[in-house]
Amino acid sequence: MISLILGGARSGKSRYAEQLASRSQLPVLYIATATALDAEMAARIAHHQQQRPSEWQLCECPLQLAETLAQESKKNQCILVDCLTLWLNNQLFAQPQQDFAQLFNQLLESLQGASAEIIFVANEVGLGVIPLGEISRQFVDEAGRLNQQLAKVANSVVFIAAGLPLYLKGDTRSLTGEQT
């Protein structure tokens, strides 16, 4: 099963995804894509680390996500990827002229034949003002394309706003213990 959890900054999407992972009753592999480039990001990473159960395995993966998923998705486990938007940011700054359509296809191909439950967390960045700078507009455009492509193959898609889930595709309420 593939789940995509979308939302804005500090919307509660990571907490929701962590609840899904905990309730899967499978060993959890947490794939972290963030890099601590400044003190504020280091504090965000530390906050996420404190929230995670100590028994979860950690894989730091700022760039090689498709390769990591191709290996790990064959195992009987729950994989939580937090977050796709930071992975895209890392890609954009590592190689801004790369073929993002090909990059996204590689990511989707890595999910084929997956036996693991996979939960992706991503920011919905296209709801606000159109950015002024070219690189910022490219980021928003590519994030939108990535979210659309992943939503198409996901079994469930949930949008989180103010900590509340809105079910866009499928339904994960039974996994989080919410009332149906």
Image (cartoon, rainbow, N blue to C red):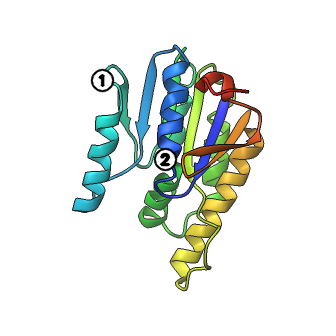
The number of numbered badges drawn on the structure is 2
Q: Looking at the rendering, which quadrant does residue 100 occupy?
A: bottom right
The residue positioned farthest toward the front in the image shown: 179
**Image x and y of residue 77, in percent:** 52, 18
Is 76 located above or below residue 8 in the figure? Answer: above
Q: Which mark is residue 38?
A: none
Q: Secondary structure at mark 2?
A: loop
Quarter location, residue 20 = top right
What residue sits right under mark 1 in the picture? Answer: 54
Relative placement, left or right, of 169 versus 43 is right
Q: Residue at x 60, y 23 (%)?
A: 177
Residue type beneath disc 2: Cys
Q: In the image, what residue type sits under mark 1?
A: Ser
Q: Position of residue 131 (x, y in %)?
A: 56, 80
Whether residue 67 is visible, yes or no, is no
Residue under the point 55% across and 14% down: 76
| Residue found at x 52% / y 75% | 136
Instruction: Reply above or below: 47 against 118.
Output: below
- Label for residue 83? 2
